[in-house]
Image: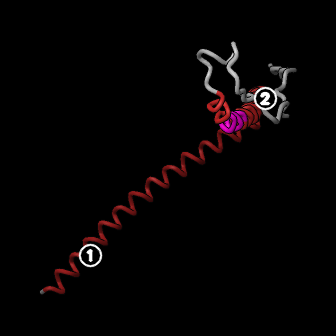
Amino acid sequence: MVIPLSPKKPCPKILYPEPVLVIAPTLEPSAATTGTNPRPDKRIRLLPHLAYVVANVCNLMQHRAMLFKRLEATKTMRVYIAHNMDDSEELRAKLKSVEDEFAVARKVVDEGVKLLGKTEKGKETAKAESRRLTEE
């Protein structure tokens, strides 16, 4: 069963490259600026931070779109592989042979590690023996 791709795709373009919200400083208090709102000088200091936040949000949106594309491609590949594995005995045979080769290689590596350990112990013993003989 093949899962169809979603017709909705994220837009990779940034729709508003510049910040839309601009806070203009006012020198006179009005009904909108009195109360809990910050003073005009505090609002002016927020503008650089706002640009930084907007840039980070734009980057996050681009990363999100890229990650969703990768996830969609991964899902499509999994469905394709699962669909084709059911019908292909040749792929199953290759997979089985590769798994067997991997198991054999793992055993050879384990034996090699054991032999290397024995060789290292023998080397240390030989060094200790040679030191003992040179001291006598």
SS of the residue at dot 1? Answer: helix
* Image coordinates for residue 104, horizontal then vertical, percent: 54, 49
Taking the image as shown, residue 93 lies to the left or right of residue 125, namely: right
Q: Residue furthest top?
A: 31
Q: Position of residue 30 (x, y in %)?
A: 70, 16
Seen from this angle, which residue lies furthest left? 136
User: Which residue is painted at 62% across and 26% down in the image?
Assistant: 39
Q: Tag 2, which secondary structure? A: helix
Which residue is pictured at 33% across the width and 63% down the height?
118
Give, as a three-letter code, the residue at label 2: Thr
Corner quadrant of residue 117: bottom left
User: What number is the disc on residue 126?
Assistant: 1
Q: Which image quadrant for residue 14?
A: top right
User: Which of marks 1 and 2 precedes in the sequence?
Assistant: 2
Q: Work out which residue is located at the far right of the displayed protein and give it.
A: 7
Magenta residues span 47-54
> Is 127 a magenta residue?
no
Q: Nearer the viewer, residue 14 or 90?
A: 14
Q: Nearer the viewer, residue 79 or 126?
A: 79
Q: Quadrant of the N terminus?
A: top right
User: Magenta residues: mostly which secondary structure?
Assistant: helix
Image vertical order of residue 86 relative to residue 106, above or below: above
Query: The C terminus appears in which quarter of the rendering?
Result: bottom left
Give yes or no for contact between labels 2 and 1 (Cβ–Cβ under 8 Å): no
What residue is shown with label 2?
76
Asked whether 15 or 135 is in front, the reply is: 15
Q: At 70% across and 27% down in the image, what residue appears?
A: 27
Q: Nearer the viewer, mark 2 or mark 1?
A: 2
Q: What residue do we see at 74% from left, 28% from top?
A: 23
Question: Which amino acid type is marked by label 1?
Answer: Ala
Mark 1 burial class by Cα count in 10 Å: few <14, some 14-19, many 20+: few
